[in-house]
Image: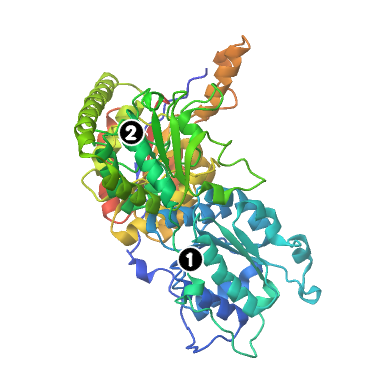
Amino acid sequence: MRKPAKRKPVKKAAKKSAVKSADAIDRPIKLKKLNRPQYASDAMAETMRSIGFKYAFVNPGSSYRGLHDSMVNYLGNRDPQAILCAHEDVCVHAAQAYAKASGEPALAMLHDLVGLMHGSMAIYNAFADQQPVVVMGGSGPADPKLRRGIDYEHSANVQGQIVRDWVKWDDEASTAQGVCDSIARAYKISNTGPMGPTYVSVDAGIQETKLTEAIDIPDMRAACNQPAPPPAANLDAVNETADMLIKAKTPVITGGRLMYKKESTKPLIQLVELLGAAYVEDRNCVCFPTAHPQNLTGVSGVIAKADVLLAIDSPDVNVIIDSYSSRVRGVVGASGKGTKVIDLSQNDYAIRSWTRLGGKVAPTAIQLLADPVVGLNQILAAVKKRLPKSRRAAMAARANKHARVHNAFIRSQQAMLKKRWNDTPLSPHRFVYEVFEAVRRKPWMLTVRGHRGWPQGIWQFKGAGENIGVSGGGGVGYGPGAMLGASLAARDQGRFPVAILGDGDFLMQSQALWSAVHMKIPLLCVINNNTSWYNDEQHQIEVAKMRGRAPENAWIGTTTRDPEADLATIARGYGAWTEGPVEGDAITGALKRAVKEVEGGAVAVLDVRTTPR
C-alpha cells in the first residue's frame, strides 16, 4: 500500500468579521406593513408560521420563488427563518436532526423535481429514522400558459410519486386553499406516531396568484389539526409482559429510538433496577447512563444468556438477536434459542411493501404496538403492581452480579485505552477519550458519531437526549447536515454541540459548514480521519480471503491517500476555524484551542488522524 506523504499541521483561523447576534442574521430591509395576505404564497407562508416552524432549511429554486418572497418580504424571514443549504441532502438531514435534537417541527424546502430527486435519499433516512420532517417543493406550473421550456423538463405527473414509497403522505393541491390545508395536514401526519416525513408539492403558478378572496388559514390550535395522542399498549399484553419479566431468570432490556426522548431514561432506569435486569443499548443508540452498574453495553454474550428480552423501540429486532447471516458484523449480540422476545414499538404501523426496512418477521413472543414511552411506563406500572416482595432479594442479587460484570468491562476498556495510548495514528479509544475530556464539563450534545469502531464505556452518557444518533437508513453523507441541524437546536438550548464525523462523510457534504458559519451556529466538528472508506476496505479484505486472493489490494478504490484530501483547508474555505492534520499527542492542545473558539461563537473543525480499529 502506498504510504501518504507527510504534511505539516496547519493552524489558521478564518478571518473574523463583526460578530452578529443570531437575531440579526439575514434581516430583510424595506418591508411593507401588510395586514393580510395579498398573494396565495403569503397565505401559505402564514400557514407555515401558524404550525410553529422556526426554521426552514432551503435549497432555492424558481419553482417556489413566490413562496420564498413571501417568507422574506411578507413574514420578514422569521418563523420560519430561511437557512440556505448548498445541497438538498443537507436540507433534509439538517431538518431530520433538528427534529431529533429539539423536539420541534422541522421543515425542508426543495426545488422542483430535480431538487426532490437529489434529496430523495435523505428523505429515506428520515423515514427509516421515523422523524417528522415536512418537505415542501415547488412544482409546475400546471397551467401550460405559464410554463417555460425548463418547466416541462423539471415537472412530473405527479411530482410526489418519486418519494411516495418512503413518505407517510404526499399531496399536490390545485388551489391556494388546498395548499394551505395540505401543509397543515402534512404537519399533523408527520408528527403522529410512528412519525415520519411528508411531502407537499406547491404549484408555482398558484403561488404567484393574487388573492381576490380571503383564505382560511388553518387554526393549528384546533384538535383536528394537532397530532393524535400517542397510543397505549393492550393491557392484557402489558400484564403478560410484566409477568414474563418477573419470572425471568436472566432478563435483558434494550433501548432503541427512545434515545431521542429525554423523558424515557427515568422509567427505563426504574424498570431495569426493579427487575435486576441487564441493560444493553441497541446499535447506535444511547438511552441509559453509561456508568449505571447494570449497563452491560459492549459486553459480549449478554443477550445470548437472556431467557427474556424486552426490545423497546428497536428499528429491527433481528439485529439485536443476530438472526441474520453470520457475515453480519457489528450486531448488538446473539440470543439463545429459547429466548422469549418482547417487541415494544410502532414498527408494524410503518411497514411499506416497497422497502424491506425493519427486516424479516422477528420471532416475538409478545408484540406491544404502542408509543414506546407510553408502553414503557405501562410495563413499569404493571411490574410494580405485580412483583412479589419475595422476588426482590433475588433480583437485587442479580443486579449485583451485573455490577461486577460492568465494572470488569470498564476496567478492560481502561486497560485497552492505556495499552494503545501511544498508537500512531490515534486508536479509537484514545480519540474518543480525548474528545470527551475536552467537552465533559460543558453542557454538551453529541450531534453525530460514527458507530463502527466506537469503544463503549469511554464517553460517559447520562441518558437519552445527549446523542442525536445516526441516519436511520444508512444513507451516506448524513453527518454534516445532521451536525448543522442538531447544532442549531443546541445553540437555541444553550448547549455545546460536538460532532464526530468520518472523513468520507465530511467529503460528501462538507458544504454544510458554510451554512453553520453564516448562521453563527457555534459547533465543534472533529473529523475521525482514517483516510479510508474503511467499511468497504474491510469487505474487500473479506472477499479476497474467501476467494484465496490478495487482501493487500483492498485499499484500491477504497482509500483517499494519493493525494490525501486536505480537510482543514476545505473547512477553512467555508469560513471555519480549523487545525489539522492533528496527530498523536497534539490532539489534547488542539481540542483545547478548538473548544475555546467554539465558546467564542466559532465553527471549529479539527482534522484528526486515526486508525480504524
Q: Is residue 90 left or right of residue 517?
A: right
Q: Residue at x 39, y 41 (%)?
A: 241
Label whose residue precedes the other's in the sequence (2 or 1)? 1
Q: Nearer the viewer, residue 108 or 242?
A: 242
Residue 595 appears at what percent x and percent y?
Answer: 27, 46
Q: Residue at x 49, y 44 (%)?
A: 471
- Under mark 1, the amino acid is Pro
Residue on which disc 2 sits: 247
Residue on which disc 1 sits: 227
Q: Is residue 466 left or right of residue 441?
A: right
Q: Quadrant of residue 169?
A: bottom right
Element class at badge 1: loop
Q: Quadrant of residue 409?
A: top left
Q: Is residue 402 left or right of residue 55?
A: left
Residue 243 appears at what percent x and percent y?
Answer: 35, 39
Residue 375 appears at what percent x and percent y?
Answer: 39, 50
| Mark 2 to mark 1 CA distance (whole Å) | 38 Å
